[in-house]
């Protein structure tokens, strides 16, 4: 089974621009979560999508948004980029079957804002 | 609000040593706890997942234990090797339908030859 894929792997943007990151979950996984990782704050939860609906959201400003498509692929968008948005953005897909639960992470997208 | 703490923040040991990484969490109402490994600039690799009803899980040289009532987990690495050098992250999933994980800030491990 192919793993979670994220594109692009690296991005350099200028302050004030916007950016879109993409995540393709493992086949059959309907839940996609996004996390931001920075040296100072560690890994912080951004939001989770399930069946095209956002069902949980972390404590981030409205500049951070996302969506999920009918094939479970997800995108996150950051508008009006700030220097502090420089981070590794990780996507995870998860699957429930009865009480069993699996979650897998992609390789991440490294965003640098200059 | 769930908080996860990992001690120590960094650890340097010679090859061959056995070591223990610690993780504590404030809310014991968890569904499971996972230990991940992260190499510099890379994504997360799941090492061990312990369900809330379990006490420990083992995989090769790794053993993770869970004491839910005291809010603690340990990751034991036997006979450490230079290839074990990485950051180790502990994460808990709470008792909800959500997939959200709350992470500790990790322990950066360096194993010297």
Image (cartoon, grey):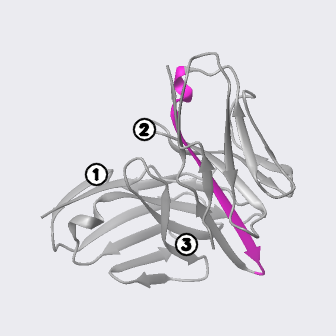
Mark 3 or mark 1: which comes first in sequence? Answer: 1
- Residue A7: name its quadrant: top right
Look at discs 3 and 1 and give the one toward the viewer. 1
Look at discs 2 and 3 and give the one toward the viewer. 2
* Picture residue at 55% right of the left edge, 51% below the top: B3
- Residue A71: name its quadrant: bottom right
Q: Which residue is mark 1?
A: B10
Q: Which residues are magenta?
A: A83-98
| Circle on res. A106 | none
Alpha carbon separation for disc pair 2 and 3: 30 Å
Residue B33: x, y in percent? 55, 68
Look at discs 2 and 1 and give the one toward the viewer. 2
Q: Which residue is mark 3?
A: B69
Could you tell me if the residues under marks 2 and 1 are in contact, i.e. CB atoms within 8 Å?
A: no
Q: Which residue is mark 2?
A: A39
Vertical order, A82 against B106 (above or below): above
Q: Circle 1 sits in a helix, a strand or a loop, which is it? A: strand
Q: Circle 3 sits in a helix, a strand or a loop, which is it? A: loop
């Amino acid at each position: 089974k192919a793993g979670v894929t994220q594109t692009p792997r690296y991005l350099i943007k200028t302050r004030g621009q916007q950016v879109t990151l993409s995540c393709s979950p493992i086949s059959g996984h309907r839940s996609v979560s996004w996390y931001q990782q920075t040296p100072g704050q560690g890994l912080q939860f951004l939001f989770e999508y399930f069946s095209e609906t956002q069902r949980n959201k972390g404590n981030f400003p409205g500049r951070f948004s996302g969506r999920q498509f009918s094939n479970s692929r997800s995108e996150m968008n950051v508008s009006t980029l700030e220097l502090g948005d420089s981070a590794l953005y990780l996507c995870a897909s998860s699957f429930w079957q009865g009480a069993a639960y699996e979650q897998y992470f992609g390789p991440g997208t490294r965003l640098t804002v200059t | 609000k769930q908080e996860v703490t990992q001690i120590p923040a960094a650890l340097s040991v010679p090859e061959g040593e056995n070591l223990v990484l610690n993780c504590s969490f404030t809310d014991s109402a968890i569904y499971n706890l996972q230990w991940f490994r992260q190499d510099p600039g890379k994504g997360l690799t799941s090492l061990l997942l312990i369900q809330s009803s379990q006490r420990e899980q083992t995989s090769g040289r790794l053993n993770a234990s869970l004491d839910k009532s005291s809010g603690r987990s340990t990751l034991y690495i036997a006979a450490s090797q230079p290839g074990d050098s990485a950051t180790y992250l502990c994460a808990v999933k709470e008792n909800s339908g959500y997939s959200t994980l709350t992470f500790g800030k990790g322990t950066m491990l360096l194993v010297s030859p």
